[in-house]
């Protein structure tokens, strides 16, 4: 954790705890499919991105490019549309509902580029069970920008999700990391 200027060790621990509580609540909201509450934890200018990845030799690796193929490249508006669809009853892939469990770990907090922003890295494990025997796991890392609002609340402003699997084995992608 990169120390904020003039922050005491206790202040750093309190901030780390507050951000962990934010992630714990977010995981609970996603597991409960409370998408309205989940979306309320985001800023209006959220950038939610999960690029596809290639398995390349080290010398051929390059920076990920949002213009290439993505699993998700969303805004708050597009996330609202995606989650609203699940409420309509026409999302056949979610009837009966999928069961989720989001586990977030290895949370590291650094000061951001602005006084009210934090760079946060974390790892995730998502278990998904559908119907009788349809199971899948997603494992990866997230790089977030969290922003403190005028009311003191923390909101998600940017998320980049890197899934460790090269090919997702899930039959659909109705899960958020």
Image (tube, rainbow, N blue to C red):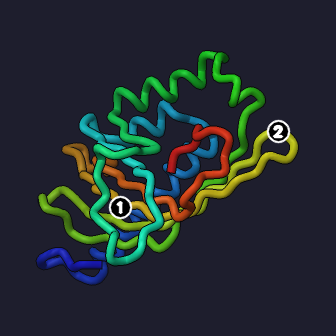
Which of the numbered marks, if any, corresponds to residue 96? Answer: none
SS class, disc 1:
strand
Residue 95, position as x, y percentages in the image: 74, 27
Q: How many marks?
A: 2
Q: Give the Cα distance between marks 1 and 2.
A: 32 Å
Badge 1 crowding class, 10 Å Cα cut-off, few under 14, some 14 to 19, many 20 or more, is some
Residue drawn at the location 51% of the way across and 23% of the way down: 84
Residue 155 is left or right of residue 124, and the answer is left
Q: Residue at x 18, y 74 (%)?
A: 4
The mark nearer the N terminus, 1 or 2, is: 2
Q: Is residue 158 left or right of residue 55?
A: left
Q: Would you say residue 155 is visible in this rendering?
A: no
| Residue 152 drawn at (x, y percent) | 26, 50
Image height of 78 relative to 4, above or below:
above
Where is residue 124 shown, x and y percent of the image?
Answer: 53, 63
| Residue nearest the observer in this picture, 143 or 171 | 171
Q: Quadrant of the N terminus?
A: bottom left
**Residue 95 vs residue 58, the one in the foreground:** 58
Q: Are marks 1 and 2 in contact (CB under 8 Å)?
A: no
x and y percentages locating residue 7 in the rendered image? 19, 77
66 lies left or right of 5: right
Residue 174's image quarter? Answer: top right
Residue annotated with mark 2: 131
Residue sitting at x 24%, y 37%: 45
Q: Of the numbered discs in the image, which one, if any, rests on residue 143?
A: 1
The residue that appears at 66% across and 57% down in the rendered structure is: 137
């Amino acid at each position: 954790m990169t120390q904020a200027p003039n922050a005491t060790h206790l202040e750093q621990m309190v901030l780390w705890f507050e951000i962990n509580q934010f992630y714990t609540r977010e995981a609970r909201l996603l597991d409960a499919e409370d998408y309205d509450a989940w979306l309320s934890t985001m800023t209006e200018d959220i950038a939610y991105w999960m690029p596809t990845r290639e398995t390349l030799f080290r010398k051929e690796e390059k920076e990920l490019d949002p213009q290439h193929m993505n699993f998700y490249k969303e805004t708050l508006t597009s996330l609202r549309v995606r989650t609203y669809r699940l409420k309509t009853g026409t999302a056949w892939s979610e009837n009966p509902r999928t069961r989720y469990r989001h586990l977030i770990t290895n949370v590291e907090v650094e000061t951001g580029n602005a006084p009210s922003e934090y760079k946060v890295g974390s790892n995730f494990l998502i278990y998904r069970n559908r119907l009788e025997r349809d199971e899948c796991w997603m494992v990866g890392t997230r790089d977030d920008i969290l922003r403190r609002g005028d009311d003191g609340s923390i909101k998600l402003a940017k998320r980049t999700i890197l899934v460790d699997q090269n090919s997702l084995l899930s039959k659909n992608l109705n899960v958020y990391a």
